[in-house]
Amino acid sequence: MVYFQVPTLITIVLIIIIIPSSTILITTSNYFGTTTNFAYGQTNQTNSNNANSLNIKNIPVKNVHVGDIDIAYKTFGKGEPFLLIGGLGTTKDSWVPPTDPQAGTFLKSLSTNHTVIVFDPRGIGNTTTGTKPFSIQQLANDTTGLLEALKIQKADILGYSLGSFVAQQLAVTHPEKVNRLLLVAASCGGKESIPQSPQVVRSTYEMINKSTNNVPITRQDVK
């Protein structure tokens, strides 16, 4: 992991972020590559198989009205706010991979000094679809609205995959809301981006097809 202090504008690893007086954290850790999802939970609840991991599914769902939608979200832990933006089609509970209970140990560590917020994006899970067209900018606006509805002035933001695009857009259009930015499985997109090889694209579609058809995704698949 590498930290960068960003005074104005910086371009790193195909990512362009504008965050005055903020910190960017970029990682390509293999930990996040072991599964298509993450695991999160609550500080006082543990999985029966692992006393050091957390089970987010036991945390009550809350709802808040933001613009034209009702956003479903969960919070856990204590400390400075840390908002997580998931990948394409993932819900607030998708941060818990049932095949990787060890992943919860990361979440327990994170929640010891952060209040972690996970949520369903527009049209996914328990969040309503609304009437506005889907776009990265709209998803970033929804996320900003969630922070404002929860009276969070500034938060650490983690964006995974599609969520990394939303996180970048949020940082560009609402830099005052971003304390630190963590991008995982990210790209800057646009004409400056370098596309993945056909083999990687094919493998990704195969994993998506497995996921949508409830076929387990193995570590070998990801590797």
Image: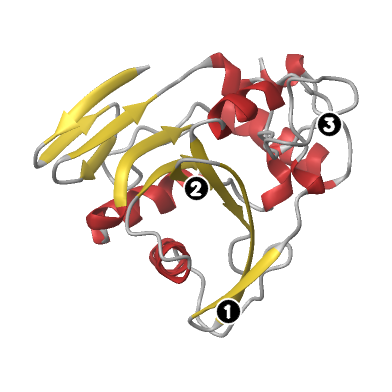
Are discs 3 and 2 less than 8 Å apart at CB? no
| Quadrant of image for the C terminus | top right
Separation of marks 1 and 2 at Cα, in angstroms: 18 Å
Identify which residue is drawn at 53% across, 84% down. 68
Q: Quadrant of residue 174?
A: bottom left
Identify which residue is drawn at 38% across, 65% down. 137
Identify which residue is drawn at 67% across, 51% down. 92
**Residue 163 percent across, percent down from the top left:** 50, 48
Identify which residue is drawn at 59% across, 18% down. 31
Numbered disc in front, either 1 or 2? 1
Q: Quadrant of residue 152?
A: bottom left
Of label 1 and label 2, which has the lower sequence position?
Answer: 1
The kind of secondary structure element at disc 3 is loop
Report crowding for label 1: few under 14, some 14 to 19, many 20 or more residues within 10 A (C-alpha).
Answer: some
60 vs 115, left or right, is: right
Are discs 1 and 3 less than 8 Å apart at CB? no
**Residue 41 percent across, percent down from the top left:** 70, 38
The amino acid on which the numbered mark 2 sits, given as a three-letter code, is Gly
Residue on which the image places disc 2: 163
* Above-or-below relation of 160 to 200: below
Separation of marks 1 and 3 at Cα, in angstroms: 29 Å
**Residue 109 percent across, percent down from the top left:** 58, 24
Residue on which the image places disc 3: 98
131 vs 24, left or right, is: right
Of label 3 and label 2, which has the lower sequence position?
Answer: 3
Q: Which mark is residue 30?
A: none
The kind of secondary structure element at disc 1 is strand
Report crowding for label 2: few under 14, some 14 to 19, many 20 or more residues within 10 A (C-alpha).
Answer: many
Residue on which the image places disc 1: 69
Q: Is residue 123 visible?
A: no
The amino acid on which the numbered mark 1 sits, given as a three-letter code, is Ile
Of label 1 and label 3, which has the lower sequence position?
Answer: 1
